Structures are given as structure tokens and as C-alpha cells.
Amino acid sequence: KQEVTQIPAALSVPEGENLVLNCSFTDSAIYNLQWFRQDPGKGLTSLLLIQSSQREQTSGRLNASLDKSSGRSTLYIAASQPGDSATYLCAVISSGSARQLTFGSGTQLTVLP
Amino acid sequence: EAGVAQSPRYKIIEKRQSVAFWCNPISGHATLYWYQQILGQGPKLLIQFQNNGVVDDSQLPKDRFSAERLKGVDSTLKIQPAKLEDSAVYLCASSSVDRGGPYNEQFFGPGTRLTVL
């Protein structure tokens, strides 16, 4: 059974800092990996999707990497802003599953002005 | 393009009462998912529909939870009777993915926050 772990559970940084969020998964046979953002009282917004054949994806100040063999992914946020404050969730789709997402518990990020 | 709609946004009930949540997916999306997100945890899949058929309901507590998608469009999730541990956010998502086909992104609704007292 696939398990997804995110470390740290919470992170507080001053504005302008670069930061890294970590995600690990137990079964390397994945179809793809996805990073989401969740604001309080809101649904999930997809940030980046990395297919199993890819190493990384970039969108603006966000860069996500994937090392399938070691079961790890990182989300790098450059020049953090207070508006980046949210919970970031990592999710994987395992190969062979009916395209279902298995989520980690998330990292709650606070960027202080 | 309208997003995934859910109602109500908030619900407070007492234990042993019944409650129902409604979801309207993005138009044309064949696949609909219901997730339960307990505070401090990631969403957990409860049930997945493909059109009006159930693909997977292995994690749905069937003694108290039920869900339907009769016409293959909108869906209702019901809890009867509710327990304290059912307090959570219930998220609905939809996608255009076909079973066994390539993955298409899931789009999430705003969720319904349920509090059971």
C-alpha cells in the first residue's frame, strides 16, 4: 500500500527566503506525482504535475523535482512571499491504480512579512 | 468554465443525525471523486465514480456512508448516522480521465466542512 510522507509538518520563514518542502513515498512504481496548494476554507489547487518519466517541472517561482528510484520529491519556492502562505500537499498516482491520488499530510507554510 | 460546485459549505449536526452533501462536477467530466480530509491530514479517497458506475468504494464505511451519481452528472454523499469522528472536510473532485487511460488532472471543489457535536 502506497504511503506518502511530508516533512516538515509546518514551516515558518521570513519573506524573501528560498525554501524546500519534502515529500517521500514508499512505492516507487508511480504514474505521476502532483503538488497542490490548499488555502484555509478552500479546495485544492494544482501547482505542478510531474510524470514518472520526468525529473522536474517549473512554474514561475516554483520548481518540483522527482527522484522515483529513491521515492522522493521536493518543491522549491524561490523568493517567498506572504501570499505563499498555505498548506502544500504532495500526492502520487501509483501505477496500476484506477488513477487515484494518495496524499501526504501536507506542510503548513507561513511566510512572515 | 465553471468549477466544481459543492453545497452546503458548512454543516453542524449532532451525533446520530443524518447529513447529505451535494456535488456538481465540471461539465463533461466523466469521473467524480469524494474525499474525506480530517484536520491535519491529507485527503483520503472515499469513492470514485465513472459516469454513474462505482469504480472504487473500498474505503467508504458502508455501514453509515452512501453515495450515488444516478444520472452520471451530480452526486450526493450521505452519512447516516453521523459519529464524532466524521468531523472533517468533504471534498469533491472531477476529471475527464477514463479508467485505465491517461491521467487527466483532478479539479477540486471548495469542500463542505462538517462538524459533528
Image (tube, grey):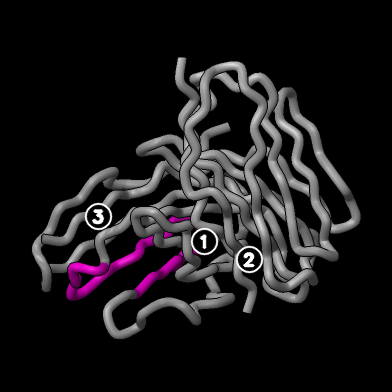
Q: CA distance from mark 2 to mark 1?
A: 9 Å
Disc 2: host chain: A
Disc 1: host chain: B
Q: Circle 2: is it few (<14), some (14-19), or many (20+) Cα within 10 Å?
A: some
Disc sitting over residue B114 in the figure: 3
Q: Amino acid at mark 2?
A: Gln
Residue at horizontal 48 percent and vertical 65 percent from the top: B44
Q: Circle 3: is it few (<14), some (14-19), or many (20+) Cα within 10 Å?
A: many
Q: Is residue B38 magenta?
A: no
SS category of the residue bearing label 1: strand
Region of the chain picked out in magenta, as a range? B66-85
Counting from the top left corner in percent of width and height, residue A69 is at 85, 65
CB under 8 Å between discs 2 and 1: yes
Residues at discs 2 and 1 both on one chain = no
Position of the C terminus of chain B by quadrant = bottom left
Q: Amino acid at mark 1?
A: Tyr
Q: Is residue B79 magenta?
A: yes
Counting from the top left corner in percent of width and height, residue A85 is at 48, 29
Location of residue B36 by image quarter:
bottom left
